[in-house]
Amino acid sequence: MDVTLENPFLGAEGVRLDSLVLISQAKGQSSVPTTIGPFLCCISRVKPSLHGLTLLFIRKAHCGRRRASSDGFCFNLWRSVIVEWFSHLVNSINGVLWNVFLILLLCGAGIYFTILTRGVQFRKFKQSFRSTFGSITFSGKKASEKEGMTSFQSLITSVSAQIGTGNLAGVATAMVSGGPGAVFWMWVSAILGMATIYAEATLAQRYKTNVNGTLVGGPAYYIRAAIKGPAGRAVAAVFAVLIIFALGFMGNMVQANSVGGAMEAAFGVPSEFVGGGLALISLLVFLGGVKRIVAVAEKVVPFMAVFFTAASLVVIFINFRNILPAFYDIFVGAFYPQAVLGGVLGVSVQQAVRFGIARGLFTHEAGMGSTPHAHALARVKNPCEQGLVAMMGVFIDTIVLLPLTVLAILTSGVLGSTNAKGEFVTGIELTQAAYSQVFGHFGYVIIAVCVFFFAFATIMGWYFFGLANVKYLFGKKAVPLYAVLVSVFVGIGCALKVDLVWSLADLFNGLMVIPNILALILLGGVVAKLTKSWENGEVYSPDSEQD
């Protein structure tokens, strides 16, 4: 009998309890009376929510009858049941957060700030481009904790976090789950997100401060400005804890795991060795502080962007005849997904919208409260100037670089292909399949290199964002310990995938959005006044009463 214990709390979707009894009896471990077993199975079928408790009852009875010989077995089973129950709880919360609540919250915030700023992402796009790329210099003043960094350095630091493995694997998953039309909705989320991140960066600049000779800023500081008194301090502290775990620890485990898998697939290097090397490199960068993080990001991000763009364009140009059909699939699939790919994916408009917007929001991070930590440290004359630069980060990530993966997959015709088990190929495997159509096995090498640089850049960015909140909560004395802990998590994550950690990373990412968006909306009037004052040519003074 081939039975898998996938989830003992999902009723018919999990393991059948009568099968569990038979398995236990076959192993000589069960002492559940035959009258109780079927009875409990009936309970679990009538009331699936009691399924987990039923399983606990069966094993508790077993432990009572055979305690002397099976204490270890019982302990492991109880532990597995608790972990499974907690995993199911976390996944259920994530389903509510990411499928409904956060989509409405983040899109609503994007619409609100688009109206409030009179479409700043459209009106000021040309100026945003000019502010970002018009004064690039790689030999300017270096970043420091006391004086911050240049506007371009802050953008590079934030983009290094935004351009992660989601641009390689996340978009592929979104297209399998929501069809090619999901890409259209990812672009919609990016356009709305440009207004949200403008507000984030502007407020991060407005409420940055100097603590013991160190320039600091980020959501924790504008949350306290939005919510006065002890309540504000409590909400800011909750946000700080959430982002430390979401990005610094668990998020970086997720990024590192992608590196381990890609390197093992392309070069045959065991993920344990990759994890050790990546952890050591990360620690060396972390211990160098803001100066070293920015210096590495300045070199890694442009290189990885050029390398990835060149490889993607080769795939797209070789399949140039499929470029127009690819755009047809994207735009038609956004509203009528059954009309593309022969309807093989079987997705609906609702799924296209849900997966597209959710994946887009997770990719460009607008509204999540992560990138303002970098934008707060930029040296600019007016907070709104950094808001424009921040908008360009979302544009580069989701409108420029992300379509390269999209077109490579669509033009190569691999979307909708299945593996040996008859399942749709998805995630990083789908991206590798697209590039291997042109480059053969070397396509796996290309993706492995891209994954390494994309993930490593994100690890640096997320460490930096978590670092700002560690300093906020505990001061500088906790920095060395935080650096070591993150490096350890990177090494473990590279070699070991724990589904619960992945789910918790999604949960903490989702929860930290709530206090951030709440503060942004409460400070919407400040954003509007700062924008109006800046557009009228008024000189900004941090001590003025412009808000």
Image: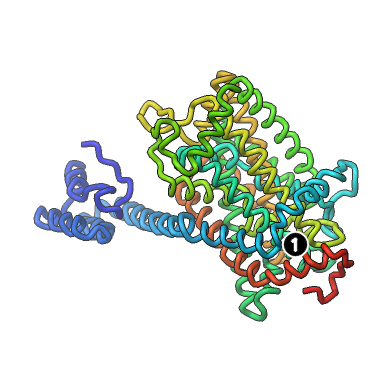
Q: Nearer the viewer, residue 6 or 20?
A: 6
Q: Against 285, is 266 above or below?
A: above
| Element at label 1 | helix
Residue 50 placement, left or right of 459? left
> In the shown orientation, is residue 370 left or right of residue 409?
right
Left or right relative to 328: residue 127: right
Q: Quadrant of residue 193?
A: bottom right
Q: Residue at x 53, y 39 (%)?
A: 331
Residue type, numbered disc 1 = Thr
Picture quarter with the N terminus:
top left
| Residue at 52% over, 60% down | 104
Q: Position of residue 396 (x, y in %)?
A: 69, 43
Q: Is residue 306 visible?
A: yes
Query: Which quadrant is the C terminus positioned in?
Result: bottom right
Q: What residue occupies the far left of the structure in this picture?
A: 35
Q: Residue under label 1, please give it.
A: 202
Tell me what residue is drawn at x 78 percent, y 42 percent.
298
Q: Is residue 267 visible?
A: no
Q: How many marks?
A: 1
Q: Rate crowding at label 1 as few (under 14), some (14 to 19) or many (20 or more) other CA atoms within 10 Å.
A: many
Q: Residue at x 58, y 37 (%)?
A: 168
Residue 175 locus on image (x, y percent): 49, 39
> Residue 466: where, in percent of width, then height?
66, 57
